[in-house]
Image: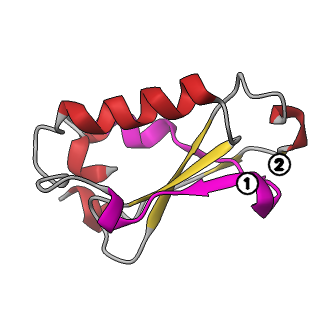
Amino acid sequence: MLVHLQSSEILKSYSMIPVAFPGDLVTSVTREDLPNGWRAFPTPAVLQAIGDEWVARSDSLVLKVPSVAIDEEHDYLINPEHSDFPKILIGTPEPFEFDRRLIK
């Protein structure tokens, strides 16, 4: 996330919201599923097409994708239009403070 910021000012207003969802509602994309150059900047348009197709198919509530910025981590995309959206458990927002060393 920090790699995409133009200004550190936005970091002052972040919150952390815990979210939980059933694992059987997740579709996973692996690195092997992605085209060469998927980590390029700017982001290749083909990646947006993968997400757009997933939303259009509506075959799962959550899409688990490899993180571009951190090896061995993942990002989770949630389809709010999916019929299983009410199964997501959304916790209480809490203030989130970044370590100031990240913005120096």
Q: CA distance from mark 2 to mark 1?
A: 5 Å
Look at the picture and state if 49 lies above or below 67.
above
**Mark 1 residue type:** Pro
Look at the picture and state if 6 lies above or below 88.
above
Q: Is residue 16 magenta?
A: yes
Look at the picture and state if 37 lies above or below 10.
below
Look at the picture and state if 52 lies above or below 76.
above
Question: Picture quarter containing residue 9?
Answer: top left
> Which corner quadrant holds the C terminus?
bottom left
**Mark 1 neighbour class, 10 Å CA radius: few under 14, some 14 to 19, many 20 or more:** few
The residue sitting at 46% across, 29% down in the picture is 53
From the image, tell me which residue sits under label 1: 18
What percent of the width, then of the height, locates residue 90? Answer: 82, 44
Q: Relative to residue 16, is residue 37 drawn left or right?
A: left
**Residue 91's disc number:** 2
**Mark 2 neighbour class, 10 Å CA radius: few under 14, some 14 to 19, many 20 or more:** few
The residue sitting at 69% across, 48% down in the picture is 17
Q: Relative to residue 27, is residue 14 drawn left or right?
A: left
The residue sitting at 74% across, 28% down in the picture is 82
Q: Are marks 2 and 1 in contact (CB under 8 Å)?
A: yes
Start-end of magenta stretch: 9-33
**Mark 2 residue type:** Gly
Q: Nearer the viewer, residue 18 or 93?
A: 18
Query: Tag count in the figure?
Result: 2
Q: Secondary structure at mark 2?
A: loop
Question: Picture quarter containing residue 33?
Answer: bottom left
Q: Nearer the viewer, residue 48 or 93?
A: 48
The coloring applied to the image is: secondary structure
The residue sitting at 83% across, 44% down in the picture is 88
